[in-house]
Amino acid sequence: MKNFWATLPKPFFVLAPMANVTDAAFRQMIAKYGKSTRPEYWGGPDVTWTEFVSADGLVLATEEGKQKLLRDLVYTETERPIVAQLFTANPKHMEQAAAIVAGLGFDGIDINMGCPDKSIEKQGAGAKLMLKPDLAVELIRAAKRGVLQSATAAGQQPIPISVKTRLGYNKDVLDSWLPILLAEEPAAITIHARTRKEMSKVPARWERVARAVEIRNSSSSKTLIIGNGDVQDMQDARQKADMSDADGVMIGRAIFGTPWLFSNRLPPPVPERLRIAVEHAKLFEQLLGDVKSFAIMKKHFKAYVEGFPGAKELRIRLMETECAAEVENIVEQFLQEGVY
């Protein structure tokens, strides 16, 4: 399996991993409606990430638990290149989980070193790894061992390892933190341009992404630098790529309610937008309805249903739904009334 990172155009634009957001259903919607003008790629994003998945769970869970976790790692060919994101503070578990994931045919594995969720940090994973650089290094090496084992058994080349992180934990330590990661030669490093302490309460500092590029260049590293934070749309993504000289830009929250974002086309008319929301709800129910609560869809409804007459009332009704059929009935009734 070739290293897809080396084939990407620059700058490239990628889909962020977001828990209970970029699940299998939403990724398929993005691949379908975000079709890129770039003929060499199937879907909209140049690279797609899964939600983060617990490496500990993949190794230690019961068979039933593992099967549930693996549902977060279901993907289609339309989503390629696709990267599975793992989190753990246990190098042994990372090695084993990386081998499992590589065996599933993913194009790459990403290690989460930036998530601020308290339940993740209690495990010593996510953003906590910025306070434990030695462990972070061990995890990268463990992941590389895992994919090498899988590749050797299959007679293939090992898939690449990447890292997603932040500027620091309580303060910006990019100048000391990034060289530690670069020394391990990951294929790519995504920099969320805030510290863990800042969360998303302050504007992302893209000048620090530019600094990350400078650090990378001064070390003669081949690792790609991806910037992340406050990207509004494709035009904004291109502007941020230009100002920072980043190899790529990761788009997160802006994708809510806009699976067509990567296509760079104008938002569709209200009827089409609402029927896309219905399609999304049906796909979620089909793929994940037996393992995830339908309530997850409600955060999407908030984004799909805004900015037109009657949106508030429609949104209130959709927030009370419990299945895709109810969503479809409410939407079709709204469209028949023609108040928009």
Image (cartoon, helix red, strand yellow):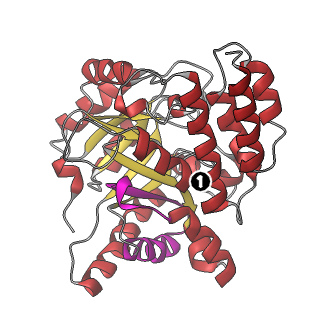
Q: Quadrant of residue 185?
A: bottom left
Residue 248 point in image, percent of width and height: 29, 35
Segment colored magenta: 74-103
Tell me if I can see residue 93 in this picture. Answer: yes
Residue 48 left/right relative to 332: left
Residue 113 point in image, percent of width and height: 50, 49
Identify whether 30 is placed above or below 138: above
Identify whether 330 is placed above or below 146: above
Q: Residue at x 26, y 71 (%)?
A: 158
Give the labeled residue for mark 1.
283
Number of dots carrying numbers: 1
176 or 142, nearer to the observer: 142
Q: Quadrant of residue 264?
A: top left
Disc 1 marks which amino acid? Leu
Tell me if I can see residue 56 in this picture. Answer: no
Residue 79 left/right relative to 244: right
Q: Residue at x 41, y 61 (%)?
A: 76
Query: Magenta includes 206?
Result: no
